[in-house]
């Protein structure tokens, strides 16, 4: 598409946007008397207006039915976590047996590492992206320390975790370098664990190629999809990825600290030999209330559930998925590519206006290698630009030392929003 640098053009795109009505389904914080322009959906998505009703329904059920809410139709709590399966499967590219909704993200990552990081004296290494989200770094290091204990003193985070960094002078990991590192690690490699999209650079990794390479090396492959779920198309089942985790409060708009999801590939659905931490809600549902001694896991991802469901955390997830489904997931991704493309175009225009590269875009140029987020490096005055954006009611996020992350999400951002961002930045630089 040929973009133009004027508000009229942006407004025309908005007018013909089939998803334009969804903006009015969200609450926006108010600043200086106006709703803000919100580009922080990669950190905490906005609240849908229907969320209150979804939670309210469960509050009423609790009030009126109390313990009977577990079994009474409609939507008994005992099956409540399954209500999201349809749309979760569409978002993740999964089949129902592969998904469970539970806990929160880092907890789930640790639980799945118990199953899929099984170090031996020979095969104990984990490949990760350098500069992974800190929680993931801590989780992986703690697993190495915990699980390698029985292997003796030699295996430590220092020699077990291989972090991949971009080449000197580059900002992004090359797929070929990732694949080569996996190959080189060969029969010492126990696990590849990467983000689907790196939270800092916005780079989407080639998850299919990474999965294939990891398996060729004889390792398990897992992804943290915190920045990918609801942001880019995923095909976990088809790729053959062993496991994945994601959170629901970023692109999936389910509220602070809300529930997480796990994906465990169907090929592991009846592998009861996989070690796991167990709890009663993962026990075979038919026998769960016999309260027998021996743990007999459910088939598939549900065999990793431990506790009865957090209804008030899953309710907002269901509200959000209802909106995703109504908007159409493919429609959202299509708009997302164009909206972010417009942001990219306008940032490049600023550089042309200034006659120099005032802003560098860290995120890959190719729409296949990114979601909606662009990470912008400000070669000067970044902090000042960020403050001016904040004062103008445009919410972005600042990462030391000089990066502003901007995430126009297709559900509640418009082309005019993106133009306003350009307008403020272009004036201040
Ligand atoms: C947001 C995010 C987290 C946060 O983890 P919580 O357990 O939900 O607090 C972890 N990892 C990644 C990659 C993230 O983007």
Image: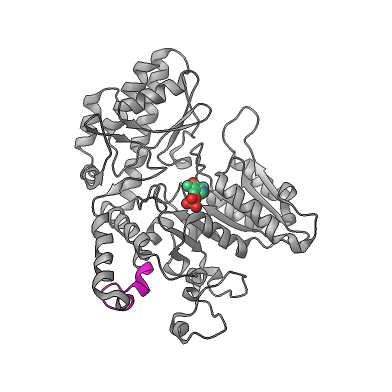
Please, is residue 33 above or below residue 180 in the view?
A: above
Is residue 17 among the parts visible in the rendering? yes
Relative placement, left or right, of 393 versus 175 is: left
Please, is residue 283 above or below residue 322 in the view?
A: below
Q: Position of residue 67 (x, y in %)?
A: 32, 77
Please, is residue 414 above or below residue 107 in the view?
A: above
234 in the magenta segment: no
70 in the magenta segment: yes
Q: Which quadrant: the N terminus? A: top left
Please, is residue 117 above or below residue 62 in the view?
A: above
Relative placement, left or right, of 214 versus 314 is: right
Residue stretch rendered in magenta on the structure: 69-82
Q: What residue is at 29 percent from the left and 45 percent from the top?
A: 411
Q: Where is residue 13, by image quadrant?
A: top left
Q: Position of residue 28 (x, y in %)?
A: 27, 40
Here the colouring is one colour
Q: What residue is at 80 percent from the left and 54 percent from the top?
A: 154
Instruction: Please state which of residues 346 and 29 is positioned toward the viewer in this rendering.
Output: 29
Q: Position of residue 337 (x, y in %)?
A: 37, 39
Number of numbered discs on residues: 0
Is residue 196 among the parts visible in the rendering? no
């Amino acid at each position: 598409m040929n973009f133009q640098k004027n508000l009229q053009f942006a407004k025309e795109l908005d007018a013909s946007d089939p998803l334009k009505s969804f903006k009015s389904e969200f609450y926006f914080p108010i600043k200086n008397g106006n709703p803000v322009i919100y580009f922080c959906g990669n950190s905490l998505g906005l609240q849908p207006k229907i969320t209150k009703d979804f939670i309210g329904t469960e509050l009423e059920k609790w009030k009126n039915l109390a313990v009977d809410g577990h079994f009474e139709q409609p939507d008994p709590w005992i099956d409540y976590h399954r209500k999201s399966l349809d749309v979760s499967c569409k978002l993740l590219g999964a089949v129902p047996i592969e998904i469970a909704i539970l806990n929160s993200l880092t907890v789930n990552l640790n639980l799945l590492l118990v199953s899929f990081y099984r170090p031996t004296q020979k095969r104990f290494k984990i490949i990760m992206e350098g500069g992974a989200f800190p929680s993931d770094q801590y989780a992986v290091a703690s697993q190495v320390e915990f699980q390698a204990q029985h292997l003796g003193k030699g295996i430590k985070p220092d020699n077990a975790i291989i972090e991949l960094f971009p080449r000197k002078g580059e900002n992004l990991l090359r797929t070929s370098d990732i694949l080569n590192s996996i190959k080189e690690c060969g029969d010492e490699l126990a696990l590849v664990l990467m983000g689907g999209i790196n939270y800092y650079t916005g780079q989407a990794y080639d998850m299919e190629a990474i999965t294939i390479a990891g398996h060729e090396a004889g390792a398990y492959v897992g992804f943290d999809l915190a920045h990918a779920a609801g942001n880019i198309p995923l095909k976990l089942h088809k790729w053959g990825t062993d496991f994945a985790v994601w959170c629901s409060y970023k692109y999936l708009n389910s509220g602070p600290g809300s529930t997480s999801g796990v994906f465990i590939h169907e090929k592991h659905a009846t592998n009861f030999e996989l070690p796991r931490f167990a709890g009663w809600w993962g026990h075979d549902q038919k026998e769960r209330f016999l309260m027998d001694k021996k743990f007999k896991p459910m088939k598939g991802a549900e065999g990793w559930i431990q506790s009865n469901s957090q209804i008030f955390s899953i309710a907002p997830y269901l509200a959000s998925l209802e909106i995703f489904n109504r908007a159409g997931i493919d429609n959202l991704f299509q708009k997302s590519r164009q909206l972010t493309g417009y942001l990219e175009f306008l940032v490049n225009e600023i550089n042309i206006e200034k006659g120099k590269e005032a802003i560098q875009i860290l995120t890959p140029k190719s729409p296949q290698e990114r979601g909606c987020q662009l990470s912008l490096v400000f070669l000067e005055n970044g902090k000042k630009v960020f403050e001016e954006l904040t004062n103008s009611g445009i919410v972005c996020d600042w990462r030391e030392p000089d990066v502003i992350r901007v995430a126009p999400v297709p559900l509640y951002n418009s082309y005019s929003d993106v133009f306003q961002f350009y307008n403020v930045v272009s004036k201040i630089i």
